[in-house]
Amino acid sequence: MYLHPPDEALARRVAAVARRWGGDFAVVPVDDWKSLVRSFPGSVAHLTMYGLPLERVLPRIARLDRILLVVGGAKVPPELYRSSRFNVAVGHQPHSEVAAVAVVLERLLGIPGPVRAGSAPRRIVPSVRGKHVIGGRRHP
Amino acid sequence: MYLHPPDEALARRVAAVARRWGGDFAVVPVDDWKSLVRSFPGSVAHLTMYGLPLERVLPRIARLDRILLVVGGAKVPPELYRSSRFNVAVGHQPHSEVAAVAVVLERLLGIPGPVRAGSAPRRIVPSVRGKHVIGGRRHP
């Protein structure tokens, strides 16, 4: 995930979580997000409640090789709407940007299962109740 | 949404958004979340990365009449794991609670379309580019 404004401390915290739990998720702080969006070697999908419904755009997005999902804060510059190949709405009312990214990722990739983090020092064994962590402590 | 610790200012901000954009979403601040969970007239589903995979639990949850989805912060008391009918994992690695709620709601209810907020003073007309709001300003 590219993050603007850059936040090095957040990037380090996420890297520590990934070392513990596995996966290759990383936060890359960026100063110049506009040149990143312009030079991205793939398609840019800007998530915004003003865009076209996800249900309608999803078949086209799902066929793409590389996608950069972009979410902005309260004030997104008009340039982003113009330079994005897709402006996609996950619902057409104000909502959380985190929620929008989560729903698009789930639709594209499904829900990650317990297997993916297999190489990490810690791994969760799904439980009906309580916490069962391999490489961690077990709670009742 | 019941919110603990209570935050009256947040509840008022969300109510103002709902008046403008429609829908009946409201934040209800609560002091005693434990008694709320205990007395809820339906089933409690606690979203936690330690629980059973959503894919496995979803068919059972989808049949329920009333569900209280519960998400906690960093320190969730063991009591919640025991008193919940379901402990459900939306992925088994650390993640955003907002993202977990969003994915479960999307799986249960689908993605809200532009129609639902029909009675609100403001309504979005989905656009390929730019912002088109009925009852608001139009941007290029």
Image (spheres, coloured by chain):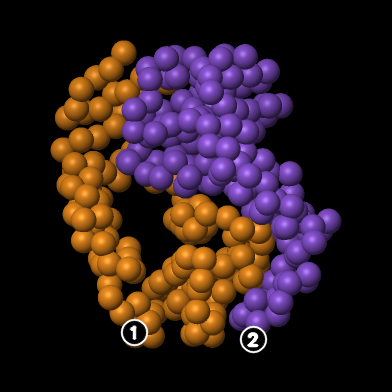
Chain colours: A orange, B purple
Residue at (25% x, 27% y) in the render = A133
Residue at (25% x, 55% y) in the render = A10
Q: Are marks 2 and 1 in contact (CB under 8 Å)?
A: no
Q: Nearer the viewer, mark 2 or mark 1?
A: 2
Expressed as whole percent of the image width and height from the top left, the position of residue A21 reads 23, 42
* Residue neighbourhood size for the residue with mark 1, other residues' Cα within 10 Å, grouped as few (<14), some (14–19), many (≥20): few
Task: Give the answer, above or below, for where B41 lies relative to A11.
Answer: above
Residue at (28% x, 75% y) in the render = A31
One can see residue B104 in this view: no
* Residue neighbourhood size for the residue with mark 2, other residues' Cα within 10 Å, grouped as few (<14), some (14–19), many (≥20): few
Judging from the image, mark 1 belongs to the subunit labelled A
Say which amino acid is labelled 2.
Pro
Expressed as whole percent of the image width and height from the top left, the position of residue A33 reads 35, 77
Looking at this rendering, what residue extends furthest in the right direction? Answer: B119
Q: Give residue B140's mark.
A: 2
One can see residue B38 in this view: yes
Task: Tell whether B45 sits left or right of A6.
Answer: right
User: Disc 1 marks which residue?
Assistant: A35
Judging from the image, mark 2 belongs to the subunit labelled B
Residue at (71% x, 77% y) in the render = B137
Expressed as whole percent of the image width and height from the top left, the position of residue B75 reads 34, 28
